[in-house]
Image (cartoon, helix red, strand yellow):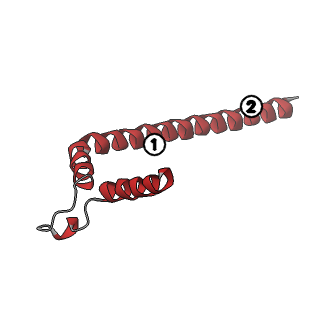
Amino acid sequence: MDNLILQMNIQYLYCRIYIDQVVIIQKNYRMFKVRKKYLLVRSTTKNKEVMKDIKEVGLLPPHKGIKVLMKGGYIYREALNDFKINSKINI
């Protein structure tokens, strides 16, 4: 009988240790997810003005004085191509 009680106590301790480890892993995972989201939001808000400037440059028409904008910004070129394609279809 004493041996059975001893075995039950040992199994109970193993179970408690296991549950405590699972709780620690869950806490660390939650902290990881929160930190990752925080860094993403911080980066997004920090670079908001820079991204706005990049989009504005992408909308610029061709400019011969600036080497990068010889053909116009990327968004400008894409819109121009779409316009040309749609104008050919509608004619």
- Residue name at image x 88 percent, y 28 percent: 1
Q: Relative to the observer, which residue lies in front, 66 or 13?
A: 66
Q: Are marks 1 and 2 in contact (CB under 8 Å)?
A: no
Q: Amino acid at mark 1?
A: Phe
Pick the residue in front: 21 or 82. 82
Query: At 27% across and 59% down in the image, what residue appears?
Result: 73
Residue 32: which numbered mark, if any? Answer: 1
Figure check: 56 above or below 66: above
Indicate the quadrant where residue 63 lies.
Answer: bottom left
Q: Which residue is at 21% across, 62% downward?
A: 62
Task: Identify the residue at image location x=64%, y=34%.
Answer: 19
Direction bottom: furthest residue = 67
Q: Locate residue 69: give its quadrant.
A: bottom left
Q: Return the disc, 1 or 2, that comes first in the chain's sequence.
A: 2
- Left/right placement of residue 2 relative to residue 45 reads right
Residue lying furthest front: 91
Q: Single out the residue that lies furthest toward the left.
A: 65
Q: Which mark is residue 85?
A: none
Question: How dense is the environment of label 2, judged by Cα within 10 Å: few (below 14), some, or many (20 and up)?
Answer: few
Disc 2 designates what residue?
A: 9
